[in-house]
Image: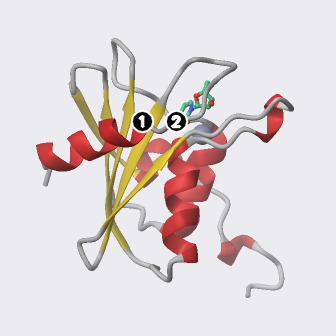
Amino acid sequence: MFDKAIAKLAKEASMLAYTPYSHFPVGAALVTSEKEVIQGCNIENASFGLSNCAERTAVFKAISSGYRNFDAIYIYGDTKEPISPCGACRQVLAEFCEEEMPVYLLSKDLEVKETTIAGLLPYHFKRSNLSTNV
Ligand SMILES: O=c1ccn([C@H]2C[C@H](O)[C@@H](CO)O2)c(=O)[nH]1
Ligand SMILES: [Zn+2]
């Protein structure tokens, strides 16, 4: 269920973004099954392709802190319409989150578009697709 306080934490996370190249701050708030909120921001690099999006920062922070199960993610962009995550982030989220997990996409004014992991990336490549079936 959408929680405005967590949406504000996603916006707050964007304030720490390192964006000297795009000047486009993004924030994410990933809710763990323990109800912890892990924030992330985008972190750019002079070698542009090495930039890391807010969503992946939040996922990598959470995984490297020992969390493995997630209830929701909120993603905030300083945008007119609710932000739309890039393909790389959709694939990384699909690795760790259930297909039906709620995803709340937020605009500058905290207008919300609700979707799911499967809604963001239907028919995604997954572990069970590997021939080794690990
Ligand atoms: O959902 C998104 C979309 C874009 N960005 C970042 C990547 C780059 O730093 C900047 C411009 O693309 O915004 C994110 O962090 N998340
Ligand atoms: Zn991304």
Q: Amino acid at mark 2?
A: Ala
Q: Secondary structure at mark 2?
A: loop
The answer to whether any part of residue 111 appears in the image is yes
**Residue at (52% x, 69% y) in the render:** 96
Task: For the N terminus, give its image quadrant.
Answer: bottom left
- Give coordinates of residue 89: x percent, y percent: 59, 47
How many discs appear? 2
Residue 107 placement, left or right of 57: left
Residue 23 placement, left or right of 101: right
Q: Is residue 120 above or below residue 130?
A: above
Q: Is residue 129 above or below residue 52?
A: below
- Give coordinates of residue 60: x percent, y percent: 58, 64
Q: Secondary structure at mark 1?
A: helix
Task: For the C terminus, give its image quadrant.
Answer: bottom right
Q: Which residue is mark 1?
A: 14
Q: Is residue 60 above or below residue 50?
A: below
Asked if the beta carbon under badge 1 is closer than 8 A to the nearest atom of ligand 1, the reply is: no
Residue furthest to the top: 80
Q: Closest to the observer: 119 or 13?
A: 13
Q: Is residue 101 above or below residue 129?
A: above
Q: Residues within 10 Å of mark 1 (few under 14, many from 20)?
A: many
Q: Closest to the observer: 37 or 16?
A: 16
Q: Which residue is mark 2?
A: 17
**Residue at (46% x, 79% y) in the render:** 68
Q: Amino acid at mark 1?
A: Ser
Label pair 1/2, CB-CB below 8 angstroms: yes
Asked if the beta carbon under badge 2 is closer than 8 A to the nearest atom of ligand 1, the reply is: yes
